[in-house]
Image (cartoon, rainbow, N blue to C red):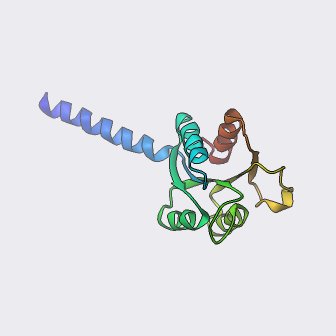
Amino acid sequence: MHIERRNVTRQRMLTAMTSEQTVPVILIVEDEALVRLSAIGMFEDAGFRMIEAGNSDEALELLETDCDVQLLFTDVNMPGTIDGLALARQVRDRWPHIGIMVASAKPMLQPDELPAGSRFEQKPYSPDTVVRHARELTSA
């Protein structure tokens, strides 16, 4: 019985690890802390795992070390050596498997300004719409 219980515990741990690995990981890049925390909460409530960066430079460092990221959610205007649009283009070129969502309070960008296959989210955005788009881009 003791061995059986240990096997059940090991099975639960393996199941938890496997299910955690299948949860899509989103990298959110936003320089305004309150906006970033709000977006993190929105995505975590929807069942995503989150990684955060305050600018494009931090985001690129994280992407170079974490191959599990499946979606980039970035603001357009932020500090760093490049803005959110340039970050989105680099991500599309270097990591084409990563979905991209670009957010801005400014009017909608022209389609040719965004990397192919990415989504634009107008701030303030609808959490339901943003989560739906994130699921579509990560197939979650």
Q: Where is residue 85 in the image (x, y as percent from the top left)?
A: 73, 62
- Asked where in the image residue 84 lies, by quadrant, the reply is bottom right
Q: In this view, does 62 lie to the left or right of 117?
A: left
Residue sitting farthest toward the bottom: 81
Residue ID at (58%, 40%): 38
33 or 70: which is nearer to us?
33
34 or 123: which is nearer to us?
34
Residue sitting farthest toward the top: 1
Give the position of the N terminus as an image quadrant. Answer: top left
Q: In this view, does 111 lie to the left or right of 28?
A: right
Q: Where is residue 24 in the image (x, y as percent from the top left)?
A: 54, 46
Give the position of the C terminus as an image quadrant. Answer: top right
Residue ID at (84%, 49%): 107
Residue ID at (68%, 33%): 128
Q: Is residue 4 left or right of residue 41?
A: left
Q: Where is residue 104 in the image (x, y as percent from the top left)?
A: 74, 51
Residue ID at (33%, 42%): 14
- Asked where in the image residue 77 lies, by quadrant, the reply is bottom right
Residue sitting farthest toward the left: 2
- Asked where in the image residue 99 lies, by quadrant, the reply is bottom right
